Image: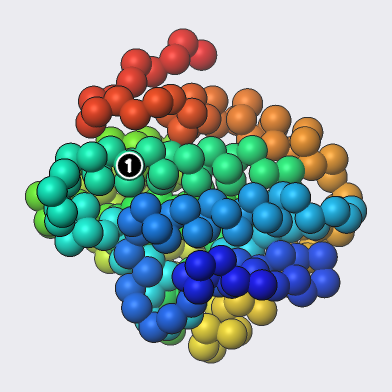
Amino acid sequence: MATENICAVEKRGRVYLITLTGEGEHRLNSALLSAIRAAVAAVRAFPGGASALVLAAEGKFFSNGGDLAWARAGTAPADRQLAYRAALRGLVADLLALPMPTVAAVTGHAAGAGCALALAHDAVVMRASRGFLYMSEVDAGIKIDFVGEVLRQKVPDAVARRDLVMIGDKMTAAEAVRRGIVDAAVDGGVEDVVAAAVAMAEELAGRGWDGENLANIRKATWPVLWSWSKVKDYGGEAPARPRL
């Protein structure tokens, strides 16, 4: 099953695998984000018992971040940027509310919003031999808002977060595992990483957790991220942080 020929969905055992297709950089724009959200919605609608989700990508990149060329093109670039931010927040909200465990298979480079998308999952498996996590905004001179909040919530170690966001370190899988940012570094190629992520997801599915309770636990564990992901677009200004 494919979604707009941008991503494909297949089932391996109890695991639904969404793959960003093609050899490109998988830069995030409204079309790609909408396709991923449609695939996640389709997975959620499938009947069945305990299951899990894996997000992976073909080619050299897991995702090289936001599609800046697309966002700045056209007659209304400000509207495109608002739509992009809203779609990204919506996808993170979808993952937080999904009634099953989620695993990101970081098969290649994950930069900027692509890095944040990977970390928005419950667990992250990363290719050991190729690719890195990289928050490119500081080098590119780009403001971060919601993406920064994802990093704040999902990278609890302040030094690791500083090195990613403020220094722009390009972290390999081994370094990311050492710093507690990802769960496993996998030797081999793309299919090896995907297979490891599917195996991890299958194990999680086998726990037989109540899906809706799992989703509610996510929202309670990361309430600020859940609140940010659900607000209407704020025109580039961060919404007020909720009281905890």
In the picture, residue 148 is in which quadrant? top left
Q: Position of residue 41 (x, y in %)?
A: 64, 50
Q: Position of residue 187 (x, y in %)?
A: 54, 84
Q: Residue furthest bottom?
A: 188
Indicate left or right for 155 with 25 as reference.
Answer: right
* Disc 1, SS: helix
Q: Position of residue 127 (x, y in %)?
A: 48, 77
Indicate left or right for 82 with 51 as reference.
Answer: left
**170 or 150, which lies in front?**
150
- Residues packed near mark 1 inside 10 Å, few (<14), some (14 to 19) or many (20 plus): some
Colour logic: rainbow
The answer to whether residue 163 is seen in the rendering is no
**48 or 115, which lies in front?**
48
Q: Amino acid at mark 1?
A: Ala
Q: Residue at the spot x=48%, y=40% of the render?
A: 90
Q: Residue at the spot x=42%, y=70% of the render?
A: 62
**What residue sits right under mark 1 in the picture?**
83
Q: Residue furthest top?
A: 243
Indicate left or right for 8 with 28 as reference.
Answer: right
Q: Position of residue 217 (x, y in %)?
A: 69, 32
* Figure label count: 1
Q: Residue at the spot x=43%, y=39% of the render?
A: 89
The answer to whether residue 153 is seen in the rendering is yes
- Quadrant showing the N terminus: bottom right
In the picture, residue 60 is in which quadrant? bottom left
Rendered view: 233 above or below 196: above
Rendered view: 67 above or below 212: below
Q: Residue furthest front?
A: 75
Q: Residue at the spot x=41%, y=44% of the render?
A: 87
**65 or 9, which lies in front?**
9
